[in-house]
Image: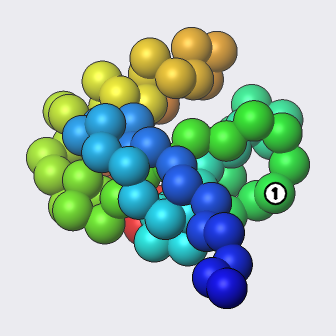
Amino acid sequence: MKKHQPVRMCIVCKNRFEKRLLNRFSMDANKLCVNVKLGRGIYLCQTCALKEEKILYKAFSKMCKKLKIIPQNLKELF
């Protein structure tokens, strides 16, 4: 009998992947944190992580409205 694998959706491409294949981001004290298990998180697949900064900036700004994201900081998180 196979064990259930959680499935999550990438915020950029909207494709569904197993949770273990995605990078998880969450907000902690108005900072964007990687792989922190606190609070509500957003997920990003590996192919979308390599896309241009403008696309990533647009996706993250929609999901994290309180956070002022600078595009140069996004690439540093990966």
Which residue lies at the image location 60% right of the left edge and 49% below the top edge? 25
Which quarter of the figure has residue 9?
top left
Relative vertical location of residue 62 with respect to residue 71 in this rendering, above or below = above
Classify mark 1: helix, strand or loop: loop
Amino acid type shown at disc 1? Lys
**Any part of residue 71 in sight:** no
Describe residue 32's horizontal placement relative to residue 55 as left or right: right
Which residue lies at the image location 83% right of the left edge and 39% below the top edge? 39
- Where's residue 17, x and y in %? 41, 59
- Of 64 and 12, the residue lying toward us: 12
- Where's residue 42, x and y in %? 57, 41
Q: Indicate the quadrant containing the N terminus: top left, top right, bottom left or bottom right.
A: bottom right
**Category of crowding for the residue at label 1, using alpha-carbon neighbours closer than 10 angstroms: few (below 14), some (14–19), many (at least 20):** few
- Where's residue 10, x and y in %? 39, 45
Please identify the residue farthest to the left as the structure is shown: 52
Q: Mark 1 — residue? A: 37
Q: Indicate the quadrant containing the C terminus: top left, top right, bottom left or bottom right.
A: bottom left
- Where's residue 16, x and y in %? 38, 49
